[in-house]
Image (spheres, rainbow, N blue to C red):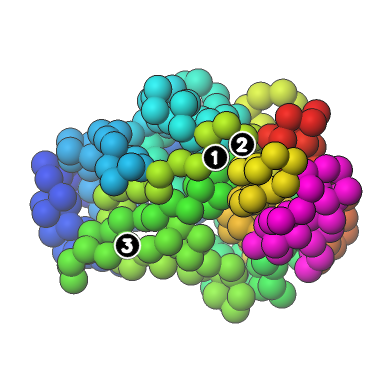
Amino acid sequence: MRPIDYTVAQDVKGALQKLSARPADSVPIGGGTNLVDLMKLYVQNPATLVDINGLPLAEIQEEGGGLRIGALVRNSDLANHPLVRERYPVLSEALLAGASPQLRNMATVGGNIMQRTRCAYFRDISQPCNKREPGSGCGAIGGYTRMHAVLGVSDKCIAVNPSDMNVALAALDATVHISGPKGERKVPFVEFHLVPGSHPEKETVLQPGELITHVTLPASRFAARSHYLKVRDRASYAFALTSAAVALELDGHTIKDARVALGGVATKPWRSHEAEKALIGQPADEVRFKAAAAAAMKGAKPQGENTFKVELARRTLVRALSMAAGLA
Ligand code: SF4
């Protein structure tokens, strides 16, 4: 049994002070749906929990033609918000594809952004894991890899980022807003998560003592044609084998603009500019969708049981694009 300090913050300034007191050992807790799981498994062992549920970060507001989404907005509230359903349906679909209703009622946007991998070796402290314990090795490489990544992998880690919401936020050009001891800063969502490289323990650009306060979305140009498609082992409450968040802007039959992000196959929410390049200026048809899917998966490095993901991801993307274009 380890003692854990628990403290409640009343505002952002107070939360930052509490986090900064012991930055390496303190973590904020919102819904706790991921963090408490990992604490029970002794995978994550913070000395101090800073409860941020009282902070004024649970609003969804229109801002600059887009949306400002507080870090404490619950996943179910975001998924069902009228402006999200109307202007960013791909985000609503991604959220509703994740977890269970009970978990979505508790889980927050900030927590979902920081959601950690479901790699079974990471979650079992008897196994080697470079992410949990740098330098200890990787149980997955050479082990059972069916749920692991094929994009963004390194020889140190092949763990998948498990979030559905993150895939949609990557496609929608979201921005993450952060407060910390040195002030406020913002990071494009696609740059917030890191590929593992030589340091799988570094998962995001968030520094110790910093706090995600909100996320912003630019004005929506893709409300009419977007889709989140998730392929999984059972119809609900399962993590993605593959997923795709896509958005298209059409001029007649021609693709004027496109957004493509993939989930279930990569070590971070995977925006595919290669697929977008293969689509923009081209006719919206299956030939182009297949070309985009091939471009998206070109650098894939499967190993062992996850080889099937390469073809499944291609098919997932073609299907998602067909549905967004109204062809499927
Ligand atoms: Fe750990 Fe990454 Fe290897 Fe999983 S894939 S055991 S998270 S280092």
Give the residue at x 53% y 52%.
170
Neighbour class for label 3 at 10 Å: few (<14), some, many (≥20)?
some
Depth check, front residue: 167 or 162: 167
Judged from the image, the secondary structure of the residue bearing numbered disc 3 is strand
Give the residue at x 27% y 65%.
185
Work out whether mark 3 precedes mark 1 in sequence or the reverse, and give the earlier one: 3
Residue 204 located within the stretch drawn in magenta: no
Q: Amino acid at mark 1?
A: Phe
**Could you say where residue 27 lies in the image, as x and y percent from the top left?**
31, 54
The mark lying in front, picked from 2 and 3, is 2
Quarter holding the C terminus?
top right
| Residue bearing mark 1 | 222
Mark drawn on residue 279: none
Answer with the quarter of the image where residue 276 lies. Answer: bottom right
Q: Is mark 1 in CB contact (under 8 Å) with mark 2?
A: yes
Give the residue at x 62% y 35%.
225
